[in-house]
Amino acid sequence: MAAVHRDYTMNLLYFLSNDPSIPKAVRDQTRLYGLAKDEFTSSDNFPTQLYIRENLRMIGDVVMVESDLLAENRKSDAIAVGAYAIDCHYVQRFVDRSGNVVMEGTMPSTDTVTGYQIPFGALLPKKTEASNLISSVCISASHVAWASLRVEPTFLALGEAAGVAAAMSVKSGDALHQLNAVALQSTLSSNGAIVSL
């Protein structure tokens, strides 16, 4: 799979640099691009790891969606806050019937994310499926909500919340779904975590 991404990237750059259908200014600019000669020297100067922007996510009893980021941004069982923009990238490029390149799948949002609380339930699978699983990355969220949740500061906050919740579950003997949200919030807050807007 990594080879497919490398081939796509290198072929796209070649196309943009050389195809006569591309405006000369774009071709000239793209010809200035190149791989860093002093980085990734063991792999022909191409990164050895793929950046995976979107991964599998569970579907829990609570699924975060766009409105949770914009309109219904306060949650009674909040365990962290997020504030990154809804940043959906395109899915693919294609040439339309007029010969224009179209980038499909991007979502230009006119709404501004000012901050939102992340509910504890979004870290849990459906109650009927598992009682001993918690995830701070593969959380229960739509594609649009994920476009904001996916950043490292939010992952750090969610990781702390998941760790504290797991420790509380083991100590109390309660299933994760049964944890007292107020006690979890209190523990997180006393550790310096931000759980409210």
Image (cartoon, helix red, strand yellow):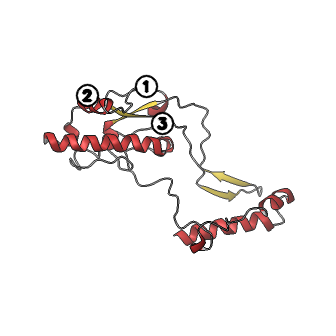
Q: Is residue 134 left or right of residue 19?
A: left
Q: Amino acid at mark 1?
A: Leu
Q: Is residue 48 visible?
A: yes
Q: Amino acid at mark 3?
A: Glu
Number of numbered discs: 3
For the point 48% across and 53% down, which residue is it? 54
Relative to 154, say whether 101 is above or below: below
- Percent x, y for residue 130? 22, 49
Q: Residues within 10 Å of mark 3 (few under 14, many from 20)?
A: some
Relative to 176, say whether 114 is above or below: above
Q: In the image shown, does 30 or 61 lie closer to the viewer?
A: 30
| Residue of label 2 | 182
Is there CB contact under 8 Å for labels 2 and 3?
no
Residue at the far right: name it: 24
Relative to 152, say whether 192 is above or below: above
| Residue of label 3 | 66
Q: Amino acid at mark 2?
A: Val
Q: In the image shown, does 96 or 103 lie closer to the viewer?
A: 103
Secondary structure beneath dot 2 equals helix
- The picture quadrant where one finds residue 168 is top left
- Percent x, y for residue 111? 58, 31
Q: Residues within 10 Å of mark 1 (few under 14, many from 20)?
A: some
Residue at the far front: name it: 38
| Residue of label 1 | 197
Residue 164 is tagged as none
- The picture quadrant where one finds residue 17 is bottom right
Q: In front: mark 1 or mark 3?
A: 1
- Percent x, y for residue 185? 29, 30
Relative to 182, say whether 26 is above or below: below
Q: Is residue 22 visible?
A: no
For the point 62% across and 74% down, which residue is it? 44
Quote the CA–CA distance across marks 2 and 3.
25 Å
